[in-house]
Amino acid sequence: MTVSRRKLIEPQITPYYHIINRCVRRAYLCGDDPYSGKNYQHRRGWIVNKIKQLSEVFCIDVCAYAVMNNHYHLVLKIDTQQQQALSPQEIISRWLQLFNGHPIAVDFVNNGDVGADKKQALSTLVAEWQSRLGSISWFMRCLNEEIARKANKEDDCTGAFWEGRFKSQALLDEQALLSCMMYVDLNPIRVGLTTSLHDSDFTSIQQRIAECHQTSIVKKSTLKSSSIKLPKIGLLPFVGAEHQAKQAGIQFDFADYLELIDWTGRSIRDDKKGFIPATQPKLLQQMGVNAEAWLDNSNDFMEHYTNVSGKWSRMCSFQQHFGGRWCKGKVASQRLHPH
């Protein structure tokens, strides 16, 4: 049985969510389609371009992304503070970037005001649009509908392009966020599309590494320039734990994240099952996470959890809050969250 969207996304409990969407047709979203022989690589660019546009309009930050052959992943953060701070003018301006203008809203933009008979209608519109600007469901609707229309036009067909509504997982704590981001960033390596992070095209980790090209975090000699040129999505930055009270962002240092994802990726690629490098990254030591549990969780994140990930007690509370009767992931959660 499907679960109501309002029971899967609740920004008052957690602003972080892992989103997955998959094609329904045999025709691939991107890459080489073994059935038709066609190449759909360019469609990855469609998705990255649209995500960039939507992240600039919605009050939703992108933490991580990976566009694969027949599906894509997003890790998103709902910025309720920004959403609530928007003025009516900002709300209308943002919404009109996505949809044809409502006559009353256009009148307000052109004249700076509306007649007394229209004020209530305008107020209702602004409240509705403000709510939507913080909605992952509306974000995904805008993304998926455009890609489906373009793909159907290109394939000269009609009908559903996506297998159904998107799937979402609530990420309840920093370890769940970190583990999920790493799962997303390592997707191309995990499925054998590439063996290196900087060659992982259409991923957030490739973009973050490229953006650090001129910094001391990543040496120039370790980077190769990708042949694919795409607009840069405004990713939620890593700000480090010491800046938690001053700056919004992911509460880890990117240098530590890069060390951990490189270590995890190398372990995933090793031929020996259960292989664990002797030297463990700084973040694992700081979080007190067992290396074997971390690798297992990062490699099989989707297998361990359904619609929520985090400490077992918080996962149960999340489900109970909405009347859920069961929760998957107890063993994985307790291994990853030993305290």
Image (spheres, grey):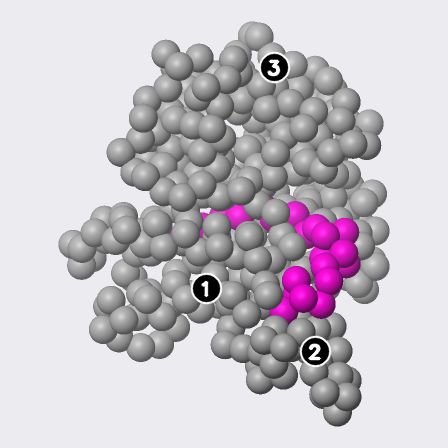
**Residue type at numbered disc 1:** Asn
Q: Residue at left 66%, top 38%?
A: 177
Secondary structure under tag 2 reads loop
The x and y percentages for residue 296 are 57, 30
Q: Which mark is residue 113?
A: 2
Quadrant in which the N terminus appears: bottom right
In the figure, residue 7 lies in which quadrant?
bottom right
What residue sits right under mark 3 in the picture?
281
First in sequence, mark 1 or 2: give its number.
2
**What residue is shown at x 55% (from left), y 40% (from top)?**
235
Q: Is residue 334 left or right of residue 99?
A: right
State the separation of the CA atoms marked 1 and 3: 37 Å
- Part of the protein shown in magenta: 70-92
The residue depicted at 59 percent of the width and 75 percent of the height is: 110
User: Considering depth in this image, is 187 or 237 the residue closer to the camera?
Assistant: 237
Percent position (x, y) of residue 190? 42, 33
Badge 3: few (under 14), some or many (20 or more) residues near its Cα, within 10 Å?
A: some
Identify the residue under disc 1. Answer: 144
